[in-house]
Amino acid sequence: MDLLNTLVEKGLRRELPTREEALAVLATSDDDLLDVVAAAGKVRRQWFGRRVKLNYLINLKSGLCPEDCSYCSQRLGSKAEILKYTWLKPDEATKVAAAGVAGGAKRVCLVASGRGPTDRDIDRVSRTIEAIKEQNEEVEVCACLGLLSGGQAERLRAAGADAYNHNLNTSEGTYGDITTTHTYADRVDTVRLAREGGLSPCSGLIAGMGESDEDLVDVLFALRELDPDSVPVNFLIPMEGTPLAAEWNLTPQRCLRILAMARFVCPDVEVRLAGGREVHLRSLQPLALHLVNSIFLGDYLTSEGQAGQADLDMIADAGFEVEGAGTPTLPEHRADGCGSVCGGGAESASESGSGSGSGSASESGSVPAESAAAGVTAADVLASRPGLVSVRRRGAGTDLAPNA
């Protein structure tokens, strides 16, 4: 396929695809899916070999958030029956972090619900970072605390933080349909403040919220322009009690196409398979390892993932290896401070433009033809899916051992 050959060549040169090429990846048929995965896999192996970086989430403060992000079980007005607790103490967070590191995690991600940290919160998280680093000197620590204000990134960096995560989530054109208590521009500003404060920027998206193909391309082109070091790709976990609880728009095949498109747009960036992989990729998770070079180990913030050992077995069975603590994740040119936009002939992402509305993707909510032929209706499929989501009842905020 000429399209895939072109995308591979561009990926190996770190060149940005055109919007039409990115959209064409999302429009490929299931018959061509393995060809798409193989092509994107060539780009992944060029920059990251067969290494898989493991990351481990710790929810430092769960629930009771004043923001109204529709996808989030911790949002204002959420009726989701999740764990709710205030700040973990440094020793509590360190104990949970140790379980993740023992399971092979190279990075620990410290997350707290809320609009953004106060100065007191920065002090609190700084003490936690210092405690984790004292026990695990080589582990990377990423903070995800919401919108930053001036000087806060520098203080986190001084405490030992390596990175800061703040996702764009969706296209600028549809952001107001998802969240009203802050803006898309607020998120962009926080990613820039993190970089200016000396932290490695981490920013990604959530797919499956009813967005169009154009929206997905818009947000990935915007991320390419921001040039974060890591791009988490989340698939919406439709939690009961949230406004998007009925948004079951993804098939495993569509998830793979989205990940492939992300790899072509961000060829030399740490593309991380994040929340929702077990729910939406299911038995096709191993194929995603040919597209991403990073995953979360174990559970998520308020939902449970598959067993940590199952993650490790999957990586080994698929012929990949866990990235060691002493191995640089990013290619040498990025580690030296030259991002994707430094690639020879790389095109500007400024042409990405705004989103084209919040219409659902072309195959959203569809039932496979073979299921329909067997008498399985859309209602049958939807009725079976909520059971795929399991609320986290272990690890941080509980007396039970974490999943790692």
Image: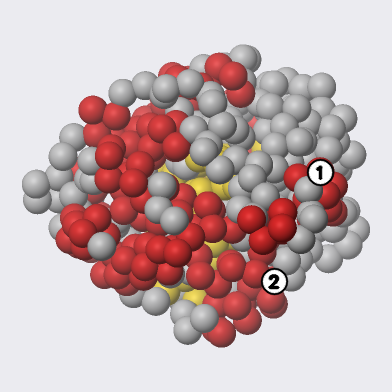
Q: Which quadrant of the view contains residue 189? A: top left
x, y percentage for residue 276? 65, 52
Residue placed at 50% from the left, 76% from the top? 322
Decide if residue 246 is in sight here: yes
Drawn side of residue 297 relative to residue 221, left or right: right
Is 110 left or right of 381, judged from the image as shown? left
89 or 333: which is nearer to us? 333
Tell me the quarter of the picture where residue 62 sits: top right
Q: Quadrant of residue 351?
A: top left
Instruction: Provide residue 281's location: percent of width, then percent of height.
Output: 62, 60
- Inspect the image, locate mark 2, and give the three-letter code of the amino acid beneath it: Gly
Is residue 84 in view from this perspective? no
Q: Which residue is mark 2?
A: 308
Closer to the camera in the image, 360 or 215: 360
Task: Sort mark 1 into few (<14), some (14-19) or many (20+) by Cα contacts within 10 Å.
Answer: few
State the residue at coordinates (78%, 40%): 239
Decide: few, some or many residues near mark 2? Use Cα within 10 Å; few <14, some 14-19, many ≥20.
some
Can you identify the residue that label 1 sits on?
379
Mark 2 / mark 1, whichever is N-terminal? 2
Left or right, residue 233 beside residue 76 = left
Q: Quadrant of the N terminus?
A: bottom left
